[in-house]
């Protein structure tokens, strides 16, 4: 295994916004970010949902940027008074914030082309912390930004996704997480003790047990995750053998 493939690269996702915490907006960003990052070998190890409160944002960002290789935030970089993410990130890094000339040029050209007025409110979207670099936004043009290992993106899913795609080349991936699933019509309580023993034999493999119900039948899906495909295959084989030991034939993958 190469040095790069063996390296563990971690990330934290911070979803910023009162509307997510209130339930008014259903988050669609975390799943996309986690799946996208895993494909390039960056593993999301933590996700947080926090309110639009400056002190909370500052404290959270300073905590997680020291703990993980990368931090990705969504939300709070629009034109309204409650869009305080950019100012909060600047405070977290201890740098000034002001109108970024490139962001001003991008937005100015956009509103000239679309016939919209480049108001003071819209200029707020060009306020970027000092030393930060822009993250392009091919949809609505208002850029995100990167400062240190923190990537600040929009909360609107379509806009966040184009920003995520645009910044991918800046990321250095490592070991890609792989997964295998074994399912069977057996209760997880029946296999719990043996499953615990299996987990102890494979400490580098994450083994999750998930009950399911399909009409009048029920069963359990075992999801095994790890970065070493060979070890993962062996553990998956033993999981299947464990189920057969109870007189039940497992299937590979999720139940139909």
Image (cartoon, grey):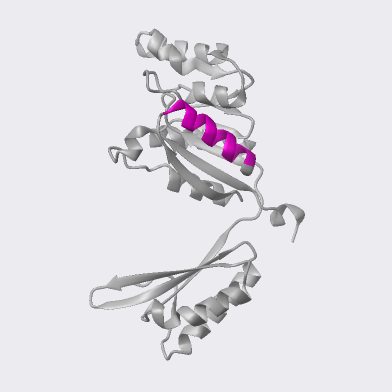
Q: Is residue 56 magenta?
A: yes
User: Horizontally, is 93 left or right of 256 in the view?
Assistant: right
Q: Residue at x 31, y 77 (%)?
A: 218
User: Horizontally, is 18 left or right of 227 in the view?
Assistant: left
Q: Residue at x 62, y 43 (%)?
A: 67
Which x, y percent locates residue 6? 71, 57
Q: Residue at x 51, y 84 (%)?
A: 242
User: Horizontally, is 245 left or right of 178 in the view?
Assistant: left
Q: Main secondary structure of the magenta part?
A: helix
The quadrant holding residue 51 is: top left
Q: Is residue 134 magenta?
A: no
Which x, y percent locates residue 205? 59, 67
Residues 187 and 57: in front is 57
Q: Residue at x 54, y 44 (%)?
A: 12
Q: Which residues are magenta?
A: 53-66
Furthest residue in direction left, as rendered = 216
Figure disc tally: 0
The quadrant holding residue 79 is: top left
The quadrant holding residue 81 is: top left
Rendered view: 52 above or below 209:
above
Rendered view: 130 above or below 248:
above
Which x, y percent locates residue 72? 53, 37
């Amino acid at each position: 295994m190469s040095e790069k493939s063996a390296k563990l690269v971690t990330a934290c996702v911070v979803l910023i916004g009162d509307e997510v915490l209130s339930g008014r907006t259903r988050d669609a960003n975390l799943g996309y970010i986690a799946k996208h990052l895993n494909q390039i070998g960056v593993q999301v190890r933590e996700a947080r949902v926090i309110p639009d409160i400056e002190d909370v944002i500052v404290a959270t960002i300073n905590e997680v940027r020291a703990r993980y290789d990368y931090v990705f935030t969504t939300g709070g970089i629009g034109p309204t008074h409650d869009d305080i993410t950019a100012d909060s990130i600047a405070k977290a890094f201890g740098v000034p914030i002001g109108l970024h000339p490139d962001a001003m040029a991008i937005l100015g050209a956009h509103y000239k082309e679309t016939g919209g007025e480049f108001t003071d409110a819209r200029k707020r979207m060009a306020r970027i912390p000092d030393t930060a670099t822009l993250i392009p936004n091919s949809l609505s043009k208002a850029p995100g930004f990167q400062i240190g290992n923190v990537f600040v993106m929009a909360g609107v899913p379509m806009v966040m996704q184009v920003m995520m795609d645009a910044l991918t080349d800046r990321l250095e991936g490592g070991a890609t997480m792989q997964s295998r699933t074994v399912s069977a019509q057996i209760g997880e309580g029946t296999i719990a003790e043996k499953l615990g023993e299996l987990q102890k034999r494979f400490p580098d493999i994450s083994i999750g047990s998930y009950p399911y119900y399909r009409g009048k039948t029920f069963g359990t899906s075992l999801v095994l995750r790890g970065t070493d495909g060979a070890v993962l295959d062996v553990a998956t084989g033993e999981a299947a053998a464990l189920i057969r030991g109870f007189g039940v034939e497992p299937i590979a993958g999720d139940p139909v």
